[in-house]
Image (cartoon, helix red, strand yellow):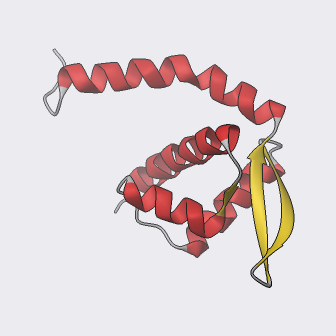
Amino acid sequence: MTDAVRDILLAFMRVHVLHHAVHERVFGVGMMKELARHGYKLGPGTLYPLLHRLEADGLLRSEVEVVAGKQRRYYTATPKGAKALERIRPQLAELVGEAGRHGHGRQS
């Protein structure tokens, strides 16, 4: 996979994580499973830096809870994160619409 394709997929993953974190608390392993369900192949070495970056950017906040005797870090979207998601929704919808109309062919 080229660096450019990887960067694009990482951006899609960030949006996906943000979407879920707006609606519910998310955690690493659960988010990896959710992303895998949508065809993303990533491990902890990709996901956790992505979560940490979203948190450092102020889009997510985290809290640690003990679950079955182990610490689990849960992430939720901040108001800034929710606002960012709302801001990109129109462009995302437009992209999905265009991709659906044009399929794999070139646009004239």
Percent of width and height locating residue 20: 60, 44
- Quadrant of the rendering where the N terminus is positioned: bottom left
Relative vertical location of residue 95 with respect to residue 32 in this rendering, above or below = above
Relative vertical location of residue 13 with respect to residue 72 in this rendering, above or below = above
Q: Which one is in front, 63 or 105?
A: 63
Q: Is residue 30 left or right of residue 57?
A: left
Q: Residue furthest front?
A: 68
Q: Residue at x 54, y 44 (%)?
A: 16
Q: Is residue 87 left or right of residue 93?
A: right
Q: How many marks?
A: 0
Percent of width and height locating residue 100: 24, 25
Q: Specify the quadrant of the image occupied by residue 40.
A: bottom left
Percent of width and height locating residue 98: 30, 20
Q: Residue furthest bottom?
A: 69
Q: Residue at x 83, y 56 (%)?
A: 62
Q: Residue at x 39, y 57 (%)?
A: 37
Percent of width and height locating residue 41: 40, 65
Q: Residue at x 37, y 59 (%)?
A: 2
Relative vertical location of residue 29 with respect to residue 21 in this rendering, above or below = below
Q: Which one is in front, 34 or 16?
A: 34
Q: Is residue 28 left or right of residue 60?
A: left
- Quadrant of the rendering where the C terminus is positioned: top left
Q: Is residue 48 left or right of residue 5?
A: right
